Amino acid sequence: MARKQRAQPAPGPLSRHPGLVLVVVVALVYGRLFFAGFVRFDDDLHVYANPFLNPPTLQGLGHLWRHVYEHLYVPLAYSIYAALAAVGRVGMRMDGSIGQSVGLSAAPFHAAGIALHAVNAWLCWRLIRRLTGRTGAAWWGALLFALHPLQLESVGWISELRGVASGSFVLLALNLFVLSRQTAGRATALRLWGVATLLVACAMLCKPSAVVMPLLGLAIDRVLLRTPWRKALLGAAAWAAVVLPVALITNATQDVSEAGRSLGWQRPFIAGDALAFYVWKTLVPLRLSVGNGRTPQAVMSHAWGYLTWVLPASLLIVAFVYRRRHPLAWLGALLFVIFLLPTSGLVPFTYQAYSTVADRYAYLALIGVALVIAELAERVKSRSRLSGGAGVILVGLAALSFHQSGYWMTSAALLRHAIDVNPEAAFAYNNLADVELGNGDLPAALADYQACAQHDPNGAKAYINLAEVYTALDRPAQAEEAIAHVEHASGMTADDLSNLGVVLMKMNQPARALPALAAAVTMDASSPAYLFNQGNALAATGQLSEAEAVFRRCLALAPGVVGAHTGLGIVLAESGRLPEAVAEFRAALALRPDDPAALDDLKKAEALLQQP
């Protein structure tokens, strides 16, 4: 059981209602995010252009529960997205922040992220109080968890709502787990543990980084609760049986590019550097950005990459040496490390092509920091000194978080800040140019695509996009030069091939586009977008029966792809099957009733149908 605690003063007026106060504090610091939009940083893949969520249907959800999507199996997270998408459906409109027409409002997603973060802060407070028996110490730890600027990426980024939701299940599970250990009745304890185990499964189905739950339970059992080894290991083994299947699926589907790979002997150094980064940013949370650029190659190409592990290792050793006198700090250090293990670089993962570290990976790791803060707060005898010093620090953190939230209001602000922090962030130039191209600012898009190519000369993406801009600027010779560069590139992804095909279509070369589009579908036959693009090229080259088959495959996967209904309708009309064409145009219009093009296609087809 948890160690006994010395008597504490009565809680102040704020900590008598921690839930309400945390809601108010979170709303004040993060509230303006409610008015933020989507960002051109994976929000298209996961939300507003996700073919299985636009519109949300039971068939689309069923697909996400049965299949991996974008190298992740997180069907519960996508179910949450689907519910929010159903609430946030609006008429199609041009969103200048992302340079694209969307039919969703970002407000419900941001509201959910802010609300869940407030809930998680309260659950953090409950967990620390259960472990320590001290309301005040838990209060200071929960406030740090709520206000630290490292949390901003998770709260402000709609695509990372899955991480915040997973955090809710993790914290609920840990609270019930501790309660089950502290409950005298065996039957009640088993019921609580059973519910906690179900919540562990839910956490995994939102984000696979919850794979560390068995280690977390084992650490809490042994360090603070003094659970016998046999009982603690049995509990950890049961949780391992729950998390490992999803972890194995994720590991099998992770596509790690050359830029994200590392040699086995390098990985401990990469992981040590990642831990050092998080320790430093916890202490000095300045210049936080989505463009850290701390790839394995970047770390291993500098002498400091072999030394940074000394900082976290030293702190961990100090915590271990004083573990008997300060067990809460020792547990906090363990939890900090354990939460970060899945994304430390010991096991390669997809995002390492951009960076091993990211602010969002520290979201739950700050629970460990909150435990350390609770230990420190417990040791301060003067209540006024504690309130004054901690208050100043927390106000400073809140001010930094509020300032940081401004970067998440628009794509341009987010991406320009990423470039300011890391001028080598090629993806930021590319995504910023995507926004500018969508908004018709061709000169700005050209400059940023050129900057992307300069910082990533071996990548295909920038040159594909350069070909598109040159085509829009009516500079065909330069477009061909860019395409030639792409055709000699190695390691092209399915996304690169499909985008190459789309650009060749825009260059009025559909026959030349077909091999690239076919290769993309071969690499990933489960992508409705790749099938849709291939169907368009087949139709443009007059291969109507082949186009029909591909459009039908696309719609079998994702019936909500409006363009596939329209494309199939056009193919059917050109094949002389007008009644079937009308049915497809009506299906497109039912999905997007405010689409004038779909309405025009339907009227033309119906007029032809009525002719003798």
Image: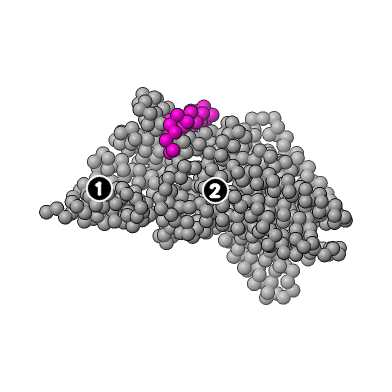
Q: Quadrant of the N terminus?
A: bottom right
Q: Residue 405 at what x, y percent from top left?
A: 61, 45
Q: Quadrant of the C terminus?
A: bottom left
Q: Residue 317 at what x, y percent from top left?
A: 79, 46
Q: From what the image shows, is residue 461 above or below residue 335? A: above
Q: Verify whether residue 461 appears in magenta.
A: yes
Residue located 52% across and 53% down the image: 107
**Residue behind mark 1:** 571
Amino acid beneath label 1: Val
Label 1 – label 2 distance at C-alpha: 40 Å
User: Overall secondary structure of the magenta stretch?
Assistant: helix
Residue located 65% across and 53% down the image: 28
Residue 177 visible to the viewer: yes
**Residue behind mark 2:** 36
Q: Mark 2, residues whose alpha carbon is within 10 Å: few (<14), some, or many (≥20)?
A: many
Regarding mark 2 in the picture, which secondary structure is present there?
loop
Residue 227 visible to the viewer: no
Stretch in magenta: 438-466
Regarding mark 1 in the picture, which secondary structure is present there?
helix
Q: State which quadrant residue 203 falls in.
A: bottom right
Q: From what the image shows, is residue 168 above or below residue 44? A: below
Q: Mark 1, residues whose alpha carbon is within 10 Å: few (<14), some, or many (≥20)?
A: many
| 59 with respect to 264 (left or right) | left
Residue located 67% across and 41% down the image: 274
Q: From what the image shows, is residue 411 above or below residue 195? A: above
Amino acid beneath label 2: Ala
